[in-house]
Amino acid sequence: MTAYGSRAERWVATRWPAIRARGMWRFVLVKGVALWGGLMLALMGAVMLLQLGTGHPRLPLVLAVAVPLCAFGGLCWGLLTWIFNERIHRAINDKNDIA
């Protein structure tokens, strides 16, 4: 058995230092805005395309509104993920310092 209690703690202990070294804004922009926001935009675009059809006059407007919303959602997701991983990282380091 490992010293880490959960899968999240194991992941943070092994992978987080390398990700953390690259910087918060790189993580937020790449993992949050590009990956999470991009996937949400692709999913929303596919659903709207299926629901409205290719010839619907409002489809470009819906997609134009979805782009900044998905980017903002990705930004929030990236920042929250960074904050939670930092908390886990600090808790692990504090636990190791005490032991």
Image: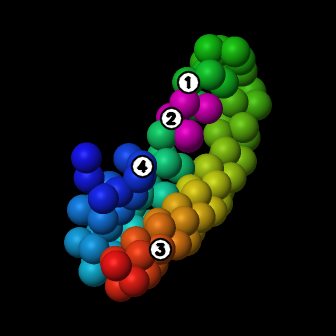
Q: Is residue 75 visible?
A: no
Q: Tell me the CA gap for discs 3 and 2.
A: 36 Å
- Real-space Cα separation, disc 3 to disc 4, in angstroms: 13 Å
Numbered disc 1: secondary structure: helix
Give the alpha-carbon distance from disc 2 to disc 1, as whole Å: 6 Å
**Mark 4: which amino acid?**
Ser
Q: CA distance from mark 3 to mark 1?
A: 41 Å
Give the residue type at disc 1.
Answer: Ala
Q: In what quadrant of the picture does the C terminus appear?
A: bottom left
Which residue is tagged 4? 6
Q: Relative to 3, is 30 on the left or the right?
A: right
**Magenta: main secondary structure:** helix
Q: Which mark is residue 46?
A: 1
Amino acid at dot 2: Ala
Amino acid residing under circle 3: Ala
| Marked residue nearer the N-terminal end (4 or 2) | 4
Q: Which mark is residue 35?
A: none
* Residue 9 % position (x, y): 39, 58
